[in-house]
Amino acid sequence: MRAGDDPATSVVDAGVVHHRLRNLVVVGTSTFPTFSRAAPSLTAAAPSVCAAQQLLQPR
């Protein structure tokens, strides 16, 4: 799932929120353009932590 600002060329925005379904947060390695060989578990967990922080912030 490509991340980007344009819904025509990407699925999620920079905050990993789906363009069309704004209450859907996509976390995991599916939004990564590439993947590192070093520490993949921590790299994969990072979007989850960022998304959780965004969800906890008052709007």
Image: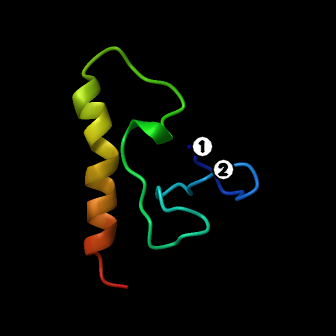
Whole-percent x, y for residue 10 in the image: 66, 50
Whole-percent x, y for residue 4 in the image: 63, 51
Mark 1 nearby-residue class (10 Å; few <14, some 14–19, many ≥20): some
Left or right: 46 as drawn, with respect to 18: left
Marks 1 and 2 sit apart, C-alpha to C-alpha, by 5 Å
Left or right: 49 as drawn, with respect to 10: left
Point out the image quarter for the C terminus: bottom left
- Are the two marked residues, 1 and 2, in contact with CB atoms closer than 8 angstroms? yes
Whole-percent x, y for residue 35 in the image: 43, 23
- Residue 53: quarter of image: bottom left
* Position above or below: 35 against 15: above
Point out the image quarter for the N terminus: top right
Q: Which type of secondary structure does the marked residue at label 2 adopt?
A: loop
Question: Mark 1 highlights which residue?
Answer: 2
Question: Mark 2 highlights which residue?
Answer: 10
Q: In the image, what residue occupies the spot 46% across and 38% down?
A: 30
Seen from the viewer's position, the closer of residues 27 and 52 is 27
Q: In the image, what residue occupies the spot 53% across and 62% down?
A: 18
Q: Residue furthest bottom?
A: 59
